[in-house]
C-alpha cells in the first residue's frame, strides 16, 4: 500500500508555477522534510495537500486514495492535519478551548442534542467528557498544564506554537504537516520542538512531513529530505546526501555554510 505520495504536482498562478512537477513518497512512520529558500514552493505544496489550493496538475495519494481536490475538512477527516507558519489560534479562547477545536471531527452532537444537554449522563455530556479527556492527554504530552485555562493571546510565542501543535494532534492524524514549527523560536525552544516531534513519532506513531529553515534541526531530525528551488525538486535523499548536493549548496545553504550543515550527532536526543 502507498501510504503517502505526491506525483507530478503542479500549482500555477497565471503564468507562474509555484510548484512545478513535484514528486515524492513518504513511508509510514518516517519524518520527511521539505527545504528550500523563500519562494521555493514549500508552503504551496502543503496548501495543495490539505485542500487550500486545488492543484493544476498531478495527484496526491494517501493510503492508496487520490485526495487531490478534497476540501480541507475532508482531508482532515481522511487523517491529515497541519500547523501553520503563522500562528492561527483564537486569542480570546484559552488553551483547552483552542485544542478542543481539533476534536470537532469526532463530535456528533448537533444543535438540538446540544440544547438538551442535561448533565454528564446525556449524550452531549458524555461526548464532551470523552473529548476533553483526549485533550487532557495532549496537554500532558506537551507539558501545557500550566496554561490550560489561560487565554492564548497573552501567552509567549513558543507556547502558542505548542498549542497549535496540540490542536493538530487533537484531530488524531496519521500524517502531520508541520509548517516551520521552529520559526521565531530561540535555541532552547527549538530543542524542545525537536523532542516533541520525536515523541509524537515514537509514542503516537504519527508520520511527519515538515517544512523548516533551521538546517541543523532538519539534518538532525529527518529521515529523508526533499530540496526545492523555484518550485522544482533539485535533490532528494538522506540528510548527508542532500546537504552535500551542489545544487542545494548553491540555491539554499550557500557554499560558506556547507561544512556546517549536518547537526552534531545526538543533538536531537532528549538529555538523560
Image (cartoon, grey):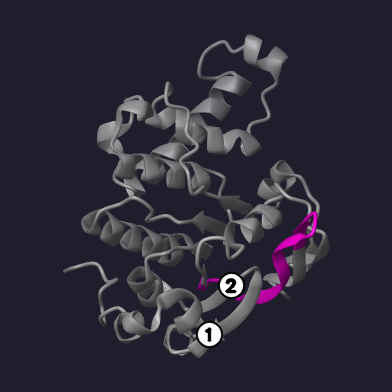
The answer to whether 246 is drawn above or below residue 63 in the figure is below
Tell me the residue at 62%/62% (across/down): 41
- Residue at figure coordinates x 35%, y 24% from the top left: 151
Specify whether 101 is left or right of 259. Answer: right
Q: Are marks 2 and 1 in contact (CB under 8 Å)?
A: yes
To which quarter of the image does residue 7 belong? bottom right
In the image as oriented, which residue stretches furthest toward the front? 15
Q: Nearer the viewer, residue 25 or 206?
A: 25
What predominant SS class does the magenta segment belong to?
Answer: strand
What is the x, y in percent for residue 222?
44, 74
Do we see residue 185 in this rendering?
yes
Residue 81 is inside the magenta segment = no
Mark 1 — residue?
247
Q: CA distance from mark 2 to mark 1?
A: 9 Å
Magenta stretch in the rendered image:
11-32
Quarter of image, res 193: bottom left
User: Foreground: 90 or 39?
Assistant: 39
Secondary structure of the residue carrying tag 2 is strand
Residue 23 lies left or right of residue 240; in this view the side is right
Q: Which residue corresponds to the image point at 67% horizontal and 24% vertical from the top-left?
A: 109
Residue sitting at x 53%, y 85%: 247
Task: Kindly indicate the quadrant of the structure image that contains residue 104.
Answer: top right
Question: How far across and down, in percent of the image, does residue 92 sit?
Answer: 42, 21
Q: Earlier in the sequence, mark 2 or mark 1?
A: 2
Label 2: how many Cα within 10 Å (few below 14, some 14–19, many 20+):
many
From the image, which quarter does the C terminus lie in?
bottom left
For label 2, the residue is: 229
State whether residue 262 appears in this view: no
Residue 210 position in % (x across, y down):
50, 63
The percent coordinates of residue 87 (x first, y second) are 46, 40
Front in this rendered view, residue 7 or 29: 7
Amino acid at each position: 500500500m502507498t501510504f503517502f505520495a505526491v506525483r507530478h504536482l503542479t500549482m500555477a498562478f497565471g503564468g507562474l508555477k509555484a510548484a512545478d512537477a513535484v514528486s515524492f513518497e513518504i513511508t509510514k512512520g518516517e519524518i520527511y522534510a521539505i527545504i528550500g529558500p523563500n519562494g521555493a514552493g514549500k508552503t504551496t505544496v502543503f496548501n495543495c495537500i490539505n485542500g487550500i489550493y486545488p492543484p493544476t496538475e498531478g495527484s496526491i495519494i494517501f493510503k492508496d486514495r487520490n485526495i487531490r481536490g478534497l476540501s480541507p475538512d475532508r482531508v482532515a477527516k481522511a487523517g491529515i492535519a497541519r500547523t501553520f507558519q503563522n500562528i492561527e489560534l483564537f486569542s480570546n479562547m484559552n488553551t483547552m478551548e483552542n485544542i478542543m477545536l481539533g476534536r470537532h471531527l469526532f463530535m456528533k452532537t448537533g444543535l438540538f442534542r446540544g440544547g438538551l444537554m442535561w448533565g454528564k449522563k446525556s449524550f452531549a455530556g458524555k461526548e464532551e467528557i470523552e473529548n476533553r479527556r483526549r485533550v487532557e492527554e495532549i496537554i500532558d504530552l506537551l507539558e501545557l498544564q500550566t496554561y490550560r485555562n489561560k487565554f492564548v493571546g497573552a501567552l509567549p510565542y513558543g507556547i502558542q506554537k505548542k498549542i497549535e501543535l496540540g490542536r493538530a494532534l487533537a484531530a488524531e492524524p496519521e500524517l502531520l504537516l508541520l509548517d516551520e514549527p521552529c520559526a521565531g523560536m530561540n535555541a532552547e525552544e527549538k530543542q524542545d520542538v525537536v523532542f516533541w516531534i520525536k515523541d509524537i513519532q515514537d509514542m503516537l506513531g504519527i508520520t511527519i512531513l515538515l517544512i523548516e529553515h533551521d538546517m541543523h534541526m532538519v539534518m538532525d531530525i529527518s529521515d529523508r529530505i526533499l530540496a526545492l528551488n523555484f518550485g522544482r525538486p533539485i535533490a532528494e535523499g538522506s540528510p548527508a546526501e542532500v546537504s552535500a548536493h551542489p545544487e542545494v549548496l548553491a540555491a539554499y545553504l550557500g557554499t560558506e555554510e556547507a561544512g556546517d550543515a549536518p547537526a552534531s550527532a545526538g543533538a536531537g536526543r532528549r538529555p538523560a
